[in-house]
Amino acid sequence: MATTTHEPAPAGKSPGGSGLSPRQRQRISRAAQYVLFVVVVVVAISAADWGRIHEYLLDTKALDGMFPDLLTVALKNTVLYTAAAYVVGFVLGLIIALMRLSSVAPYRWFGLVFIEIFRGLPALLILILVAFGLPIAFPAFSNPPGGVYTQVAIGLGLVAAAYMAETIRAGIQAVPKGQMEAARSLGMSHTRAMVSIIIPQALRVVVPPLTNELVLLFKDSSLVFVIGVSATQIELTKMGESFATQKADSTPIVAAGLAYLIITIPLGYLVRRLEARQVKAR
Amino acid sequence: MVEIRDLHKSFGQLEVLKGIDFTVDRGQVICVIGPSGSGKSTLLRCVNTLETPTRGTVVVEGIELTDPDVDINAARRRVGMVFQQFNLFPHLCVLDNVAIAQRRVLKRSKAEAEKIAQANLERVGLSDKVRSYPAQLSGGQQQRAAIARALAMEPTLMLFDEPTSALDPELVGDVLSVMRQLADEGMTMLVVTHEMAFARDVADRVVFMDQGVIVEEGPAEQVIGDPQEERTRVFLRRVLDPTHAQVGEVADLEERQAGARKSPADEPPPPVTPTGFN
């Protein structure tokens, strides 16, 4: 090969001699992808047992007695659990974020340990601990004001706080150094500059990730399932599951799933809008 | 009114200021010139202790800022600072940018703060932009808003840290004319700049710094027009007439800057914009 000289391929033509231009090959590749997609869909549809699917996943008869409680009680409670946990998570998260950035070393250590613990443990475990462990260890906590709502707010809020603290800390650190210098040069104290100048800017930056955290928390509220709640405190997953058991049919779970999507899809859309707005503002 | 004695500042191993002594009298305009990395910005930032000096004293209006027990926030109120990157608060409109420190620091009422803000924005020619946000303004307008923000605190001393270095060349003049107007009104000003025409016309005294020391200082026409030190002559020749600069003339400077780039203390390299006077 070393001695033979090859004619260089003409400019714009690929070497190799398949005789196809890149555009032709691209067209064939795309057609193959369409064909594959159609084949998979056709196989899936023809292989499925539609009778069973209809009976066990889409049987409206199994939803008897679920409405309007699914929306007026279960969805409402899911929203309440989420909101309570989110408030706790946000306030605590902001405090932990500021501790992480503190000039006092023990605060920084505490913030770090808090984040490592509550990011490293499953939310389910923490919720069980708060609901069953704390009342035994601290009798004062056995019947907290707000009852199970408070327990959920603390349990899920602790986990959310750990994630939100890291997000908020990143947001604060993303504010240019010059902002603090400008504020200080005007005679503001460090605290005043944080409150009036730095934190408002940081929160603007982290609105999309914090909204995303709200979506995650909304779904995590399903963990309340394990701590045993009364009929008026029931949330979506528990309600779907108990109707499914009672009717020996999974359609109620599908209905509960759709109820989640009523909230999560618009929130997801909102997150995308907020992110797009930020990209534009940059 | 500003008295700097034996000022030293180090960032880790890097000694940026190696013993600076100088004074600014009330009503004087002092321009500090010199190559990047010479320590002139650090010197300015030491005057309101945005950087804490490693050694030495800074006294402004009889208050020793380097005294650890001094109320630094109170002292800074009387010293306005204008930054190269403007540092306006992007989440506030121009009016609130100028009003917020008055309200939060001087505890002025909203109405009073906004009245004073309006007056100062008028002074810098921005009375039609009070409701705009910084991102909607040109660099020159942002810098003038930043000057108004500092003036609203009624400072007795204004520090300018390369105020025109980040500006579109065509907008430099607007900012310089505001600064000239301030100087004419008798404001005490300490200006780090590369605008030699401004320094020559407006400054009472020019200080040339290199490698953390003051190489030469004196009346503007003397330092810029007839520099005594060889280092000053080379700097001025290269800044005023860059097309005839010779490569390698300041090899030691280039070496220092190449090394200093790794250090956080390094100032961003300012685009040198010589204003054409020959």
Image (cartoon, grey):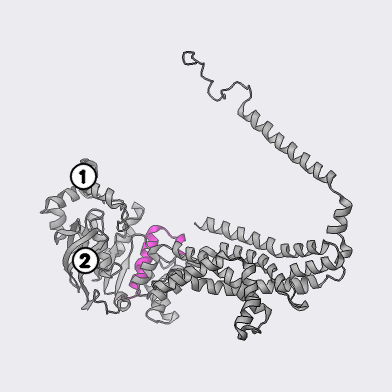
Q: Which residue is mark 1?
A: B251
Instruction: Classify residue B28 by image quadrant.
Output: bottom left
Q: Which residue is mark 2?
A: B29
The quadrant of the image that shows the N terminus of chain B is bottom left
Q: Residues within 10 Å of mark 2 (few under 14, many from 20)?
A: many
Q: At 30% across and 74% down in the image, what residue appears? A: B76
Chain hosting mark 1:
B
Q: Which residue type does callout 1 highlight?
A: Ala
Query: Which residues make up the magenta segment?
Result: B132-154
Residue B12 appears in the rendering: yes
Q: Which residue type does callout 2 highlight?
A: Val
Q: Residue furthest bottom?
A: A140
Residue A80 counted in the magenta span: no
Looking at the image, residue B103 sits to the left or right of residue B72; the answer is: right
Looking at the image, residue A42 sits to the left or right of residue A140; the answer is: right
Instruction: Classify residue A192 by image quadrant.
Output: bottom left
Closest to the observer, A132 or A208: A132
Q: Between marks 2 and 1, how big is the CA–CA gap?
A: 32 Å
**Image disc number at residue B263:** none
Q: Position of residue A267 (x, y in %)?
A: 65, 63
Label the magenta part by its dominant secondary structure: helix
- Where B131 sits versus B242, above or below? below
Chain hosting mark 2:
B
Q: Are marks 2 and 1 in contact (CB under 8 Å)?
A: no
